[in-house]
């Protein structure tokens, strides 16, 4: 008789835990496999070149980018953005999530602006 495995997925900040078994009760620490996922991204809002309107973008960082940033501080990330954000005239605000380093938005309204730019709803007139 073949059993379909039950997947028990628990999400932590940077780890996913999988347990493949017939019953959830069989999921114990010694039977689980762990996979670590590191998030390296910078969410940016600012004015683009043409037309000069506020836009948003997410930069996915490579290991080379992280090496060029140097020590992970808000000031160093801001310096890196000045050199590497050619899509923008200026960067108004950013949120950096690089490994264990997290630098949140400097303005509390920036996250809402970023979400509005990234996930705009299109309205149609009836």
Image (cartoon, rainbow, N blue to C red):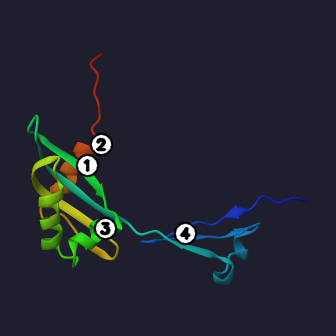
CA neighbours of label 3 inside 10 A, class few (<14), some (14 to 19), many (20+): few
Q: Nearer the viewer, mark 2 or mark 3?
A: 3
User: Which residue is depicted at the point 37% across and 66% down?
Assistant: 39
Which residue is disc 3 drawn over?
A: 64
**Discs 1, 4 touching: Cβ within 8 Å:** no
Q: Nearer the viewer, residue 21 or 102?
A: 102
Residue drawn at x 58%, y 66% as measured from the top left: 9
Q: Which residue is mark 4?
A: 10
Q: Nearer the viewer, residue 21 or 50?
A: 50
Q: CA distance from mark 3 to mark 1?
A: 28 Å
Residue 30 drawn at (x, y percent):
67, 83
Q: Give the distance between the C-alpha atoms of the residues marked 4 and 3, in whole angstroms.
A: 31 Å
Q: CA distance from mark 2 to mark 4?
A: 27 Å
Tell me which label, 2 or 4, sits earlier in the chain: 4
Q: Is residue 19 left or right of residue 125?
A: right
Upstream in the sequence, badge 2 or badge 3? 3
Identify which residue is drawn at 22% across, 63% down. 95
Q: Estimate the x, y position of residue 89 in percent, counting from the top left.
A: 8, 48
Residue 51 at x, y percent in the picture: 10, 34
Q: Sequence-wise, which precedes: disc 1 or disc 4? A: 4
Q: Residue at x 33, y 77 (%)?
A: 100
Mark 2 burial class by Cα count in 10 Å: few <14, some 14-19, many 20+? few
The residue indicated by pointer 2 is 119
Q: Which residue is mark 1?
A: 115
Foreground disc of the pair 4, 3: 3
Judge the density around disc 4: few (<14), some (14-19), many (≥20) Cα neighbours within 10 Å: few
Count of marks overlaid on the render: 4
Residues at circles 2 and 1 in contact by the CB criterion of under 8 Å: yes
Q: CA–CA distance between discs 1 and 4? A: 26 Å
Determine whether the residue tagged by mark 2 lies in a helix, strand or loop.
loop
Outermost residue toward the top in this view: 126
Q: Nearer the viewer, residue 118 or 74?
A: 74
């Amino acid at each position: 008789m073949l059993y379909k495995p039950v997947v028990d997925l628990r999400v932590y900040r940077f780890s996913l835990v999988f347990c493949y078994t017939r019953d959830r009760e069989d999921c114990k620490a010694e039977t689980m496999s762990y996979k670590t996922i590191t998030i390296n991204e910078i969410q940016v809002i600012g004015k683009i070149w043409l037309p000069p309107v506020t836009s948003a973008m997410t930069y996915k960082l490579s290991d080379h980018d992280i090496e060029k940033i140097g020590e992970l501080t808000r000031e160093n990330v801001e310096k890196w953005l000045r050199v590497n954000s050619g899509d923008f005239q200026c960067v108004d605000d950013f949120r950096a999530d690089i490994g264990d380093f997290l630098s949140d938005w400097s303005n509390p309204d920036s996250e809402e602006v970023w979400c509005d730019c990234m996930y705009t709803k299109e309205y149609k007139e009836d």
